[in-house]
Image (cartoon, rainbow, N blue to C red):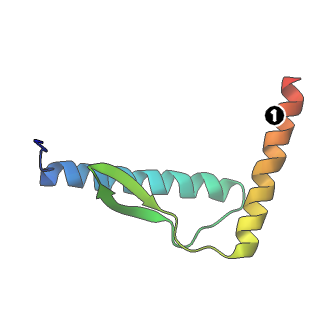
Amino acid sequence: MNQKKPSSGDRDSALAQGQRAAEELASALATVGFVFPSLRGGFPVLERGRVELGGISASEVFRLAAWIRERTEMQRRRAR
């Protein structure tokens, strides 16, 4: 099996992509009142950018889950 070793440029690009994705998600979550203090770009795996969601309190996770469910239900009602 011939696997190409990722170049440092590939890793740097993937790392930057993960950091940009984390910033984008943090910004979107902030617009609806959620803050994940540990949200950040993570070290790439298999040349792909990653986002580390980090720790968040259980109460915030419950609140986020409820928010997502409410929006999903609203969309379903509109689609009927």
Residue positioned 81% across, 57% down in the render:
66
Q: Which residue occupies the extreme front position in the image?
A: 1
Residue positioned 72% across, 61% down in the render:
33
Residue positioned 77% across, 66% down in the render:
62
Quarter of the image for residue 35 reads bottom right
Which residue is labeled 1 in the image? 75
Please state, as top left, top right, bottom left or bottom right, where the N terminus lies in the image. Answer: top left
Q: Of 26 and 55, which appears nearest the observer?
A: 55
Q: Is 38 rendered above or below residue 80?
A: below
Q: Is 31 rendered above or below residue 1?
A: below
Residue 42 percent coordinates (x, y): 37, 63
**Label 1 neighbour load within 10 Å: few <14, some 14-19, many 20+:** few
Q: Secondary structure at mark 1?
A: helix
Q: Is residue 41 left or right of residue 33?
A: left
Q: Which residue occupies the extreme top position in the image?
A: 80
Quarter of the image for residue 4 reads top left
Q: Is residue 34 left or right of residue 11?
A: right
Q: Of 66 and 12, which appears nearest the observer?
A: 66
Residue 30 percent coordinates (x, y): 64, 59
